[in-house]
Amino acid sequence: MEKKFSVKVNDSFEFEFTQDEINALDTQQVSVNNYHMLSENRSFKGTIAKADFLNREYQVKINSNNYQVKISNELDQLIDKMGLSLSSALMVNDIKAPMPGLILDVMVKEGDEVKEGDYLLVLEAMKMENTLSAPRDGVVKAISVEKGQGVDKNQLLIEMD
């Protein structure tokens, strides 16, 4: 099965790309954040001005135009279709399994202080490793799972204060 990505530009335009389409792009990296691209016999200069890799949000400059780009992979799209979003997780203290799977690693312990985006645990689901991160700053109150344990969808994994 081919990987698919959904891309939202400036919160207005949405595009879908496959991994093959991305691989077929005629691009050359010029320096760390600068690229040269050819498309339909036209030349483009691209710069990644700002990158938030964890949230897959980027500020990109193509020629002289600035764009805000948000990339969603297949897992992001599946979680969104299931009605589970990170924004809704910001309001709750419980971190639950977004899908059934196997706990591969628990990276925190009870009493740890975590910042928004810190990695909490790794859940293997559908042959993919998914790192669940803290939805907000807080303290780990309780951990309900351990490494090697199977979990069901919506099973409580971690409680936060």
Image (cartoon, helix red, strand yellow):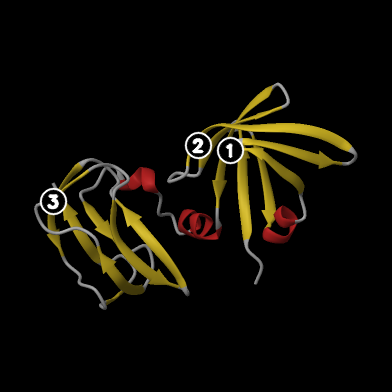
Q: Quick one: 56 or 12, which is closer to the camera?
A: 56
For the residue labelled by badge 1, is the local secondary structure a helix, a strand or a loop? loop
Q: CA distance from mark 3 to mark 1?
A: 35 Å
Kind of residue sitting beneath label 2: Ala
How crowded is the residue under tag 3: few (<14 C-alpha within 10 Å), some, or many (20+)? Answer: few
Determine whether label 2 and label 1 are within 8 Å by CB.
no
Residue 75 left/right relative to 37: left
Residue bearing mark 3: 112
Q: Quick one: 10 or 106, which is closer to the camera?
A: 106
For the residue labelled by badge 2, is the local secondary structure a helix, a strand or a loop? strand
For the residue labelled by badge 3, is the local secondary structure a helix, a strand or a loop? loop
Label disc, if present, on residue 51 of the rendered structure: 2
Q: What residue do we see at 40% from left, 50% from top?
A: 85
Label disc, if present, on residue 32 of the rendered structure: 1
* Residue 140 position in % (x across, y down): 15, 52
Q: What residue do we see at 47% from left, 75% from top?
A: 127
Q: What residue do we see at 40% from left, 54% from top?
A: 84
Determine whether label 2 and label 3 are within 8 Å by CB.
no
Q: CA distance from mark 2 to mark 1?
A: 12 Å
Q: Say which label, 2 or 3, has the lower sequence index.
A: 2
How crowded is the residue under tag 1: few (<14 C-alpha within 10 Å), some, or many (20+)? Answer: few
* Residue 150 position in % (x across, y down): 29, 78
- Above or below, 34 relative to 153: above
Determine whether label 3 and label 1 are within 8 Å by CB.
no
Kind of residue sitting beneath label 1: Val
Kind of residue sitting beneath label 3: Asp
